[in-house]
Structure formats: structure tokens, C-alpha cells
Amino acid sequence: MNDIPIQPQPQPPRSDTGIQSFFLPPGTPGRPRIARAEGIWLEDTAGNRYLDASSGPVASNLGHGNPRVLAALEKQARAAAFAFPAQFESEANLELGERLARLCGPGLDRAFLVSGGSEATETVIKFCRQHAVVTGQGSRWKVLSREPGYHGNTLGALAVSGDAHAHEVFGPLLRAVDRVPAPFTYRLPANHTAESHARACAAALEEAIVREGPETVLAFIMEPVGGLATGALVAPDVYYRTVREICSRHGVLLIFDEVMSGAGRTGRFLAADHWPDARPDLVTLAKGVTAGYTPMGVMMAPAAMADTLARAGGFMQGFTYFANPLSCAVGCAVLAEMEERDLPGNAARMGERLRARLHGLRDRSPIVGDVRGLGLLMAMELVADKETKAMIPLERMAPYRLQQLGLQHGLALYCRRTNRGTYGDWVMVSPPLVVTADEVDMLADRLEAVIDAYVAELSA
Ligand code: PLP
């Protein structure tokens, strides 16, 4: 499955019965139609094959068609495909809860299981709020977050996401509270180093807490390693420690959104494990926990908080599909594979190999401005001019064109221009954690060809 189909086979005619009709204007060509997927490869109905360079939206941690996961799914489906947690306990739920608590470590003891990352964000906010109310801290309701940042697409999750465009469009429906700047390391304010800027960003959090009134602030939510909103931003170490100190000083809960960074992707089970002196109070997970095989979102919370709510009448949260048995069974199989094959270790090793290749590309390409990330959560930032860091003009549609060129070179890429051009264009380079050294090299070769083709297109 490793030949590069530079001239893809023609795609079937576009259909308007699919979800794409909400995104692609009538008359524009459709997206390739998926036929099958195996390992790190996706194949469309026309026979073109694509290396899964971004794990879809950074979800397919195990690659596709894993026999153990498929067997677990089938076994659970035959046993009891559905049972409602308000009526029945399931073995799969108990086992997944135990596995997650062990992997997340002390203080992150209980797993509340939902259907995706956005629901996990909703859940963690409601959980913190209800806990504040029952413990006599009802004045605390404000959730501070970062700009830019992303915590999901439901209204509550968008309200705490630093996404200026979403706030502009859905504005009156969102009750947004203050946001503080994310500590970018590439585009720095004048007279700042990455570290001094990170300190200033942490100081901005404390200023916001004081400005809002600490007694009104419930939580601060952030992605420890950024996802699509920041292009895999990793802050200098001092940032994490300082943020933790500030939250503790003011009684503000620190929530790490590890929907993208969790489940082994950065080289540890949690990205938080890279900064042991900045342990969060609560964590959300999703994507990698079921590796994209079935929908799943997770809130990990301290046992004491869960018990307090349980004694006070119970957490006011629940969905038809919470702790869904199929997703729980898949999650158990995914985490077992991850541990037995030491996939976080592989993510760390392959991440370094990938980083070296991307640095090589950055050094020779006129448009690769920055390479950042941790483990196999990496991104490249593209610019029109490396000297000035000027962005590629909007009308060149960098994300769309790169994705198209990727398909032509047998690469499935996930690209983004964030906040309507305020911050940058980036390409997520985040293959499944099972990727081998040869596959990393092939990915890098193809990516270089894509970037070169785009440079040629820009200068044509
Ligand atoms: N939080 C982060 C950091 C994410 O990257 C995402 C999705 O990309 C979400 C939350 C939302 O997750 P979902 O799309 O599963 O609702």
C-alpha cells in the first residue's frame, strides 16, 4: 500500500444526501469516498490510498482495523449492545473506569464517560459548578480560558473556547467570560523571549482572576499541549508551574483539556505527566481513548469531589449514550493495546524522528516557519515570509489547497487557518501512534512533496 498515486483516480460524482452538503457549496467537487481502512492507510472507492498523516482529527491513535478492538466490539455487541447506566452497570464500564484511573494517576480517580470531547467539556464545567454549589461556594461560576483555544463545538464548550470567529457568529447565545492569551512561542511580542512571554501570559491569568473577583471564579481550562486552535503549542515549563500556583492561590480549579493530547499521544499517557509540578484538578479526554473506533469522551475527577456530589443527591448529568457499553468495550481494548505495545513510548521515539525530518523541511522550505509539538502531536506553521512571519494571503486558501495537494500525493492531512487569519496556517502532523520508522520517513517524503508543490503554486 505504499505507491504514491500522484494522479488520483476520478472520484464518484458528488452526492447531496451526505453531511458534506452542509459544507461544500453546490457544484464543488466532493471529498473522496472511504471504502476501507487498515493500519495507517485509508482507501477510497476509486482505489486511491492515503497515508493517515493526522489520524483524522488526531483521533485514530491505533490505526485502523485493529483485530483486538474489532473483536471486543463484536463481543460486546453480541452480549449487550446497549444498556442504560441509570438502570444497569456494565463490566466494560467498570473495567474502563479502573484502567483510566490507574493510567491517569492519583487525584484523577473517577471517570465519567460521555460521547465526545465537547460533551466532556460540558460535563467538567457542570461538575465543577455543581460541586461549588453543594460545598457553599455558589458564588463561583466563571470559567476562564485561553485565546486562542478550543474545547468543543456545543454552545457551552464554545463559550469557553477562545475562538473569536465562533463568538462573533454565535455571540448572543454564548455567555463568555474572560480569556487570557495563550503563550505562543513563535510570534512573540517585541522585547520578549518565549519564557518571558509565557510568564506574562501566566500573569495575565492572575490579573483576570483578580479583576473578575476570585470568589466568582470557578475554573481555568486549557489545553496543556494545544490542538488545532494553536497548532500543537507547547509552552515553556515555567508556564505550567506558574499557572498551577496561581489557581491554587485563588481556589480556582485547574482543568486540562486532554481531548487531543491525552491517551499517549505526546509520549506519556497524559500530557500533564510531562509537568508533574503542575498537576491539574480535573482532566478531559476523548479521541484516543477509543482511537476513533466509537464515540467517547471522558471527565476524570477526584474521588472526593464525586463522592461529595453523590452524597448530595448525585451529579446532575446524563445522556442516552453515556458510559455506552460498545464504547466502553472498545476503550478497554484500545488501552490494553496501548499499554502492551508501549504506544506512548513509540509516540515519543517516532515523534523525535518526525521532528528531525520536519526541522529539515523547515530549514530548506521558504514557507515552513515553525515546527512544534510533543511526541506525535506535532504541527507545522506556514508563512508567506519567514523573515517577517507574514501569513499566506487568505485568498490562497492554504488549508484547502494543502489538503487537496495532500490527497494528490497520497496523504490525508488535517490543516487549519485559525481565527480567520489572526494567528496562522498550520498542518497537523500526527499519525497513529503505531507508526513505524519507515512509515514516518514515507510520511515526511510525501509531506515535503506537498509543501514543494504548494510553494510552486504560490510562485506561479
Ligand atoms: N477539546 C479539544 C482540545 C479538541 O481538540 C476537541 C476536538 O478536536 C474537542 C475538545 C472537541 O471534541 P469533539 O470533537 O469530540 O466534540
Image (tube, helix red, strand yellow):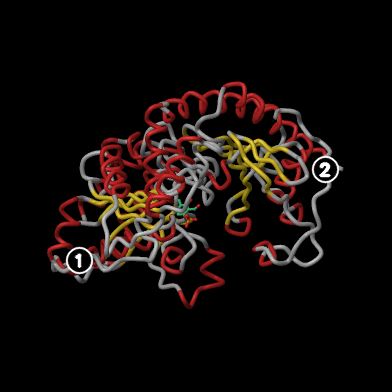
Percent x, y of residue 27: 81, 64
Quarter of the image that includes the C terminus: top right
Q: Residue furthest front?
A: 78
> Quick one: SS at disc 1?
loop
N-term mark: 1 or 2: 2
Q: Which residue is mark 2?
A: 9
Q: Is residue 324 left or right of residue 210?
A: right
> Quick one: SS at disc 2?
loop
Quarter of the image that includes the N terminus: top right
Percent x, y of residue 309: 18, 63
How many neighbours does mark 1 have within 10 angstroms: few (below 14), some (14-19), or many (20 or more)? few
Q: Which residue is mark 1?
A: 314
Q: Residue at x 53, y 63 (%)?
A: 164
Percent x, y of residue 353: 55, 23
Disc number at residue 152? none
Give, as a three-letter code, the residue at label 2. Gln
Q: Is residue 47 left or right of residue 89?
A: right
Q: Residue at x 43, y 42 (%)?
A: 261
As displayed, is residue 225 above or below residue 449? below
Quarter-wise, where is residue 380 in the image?
top right
Percent x, y of residue 202: 35, 49
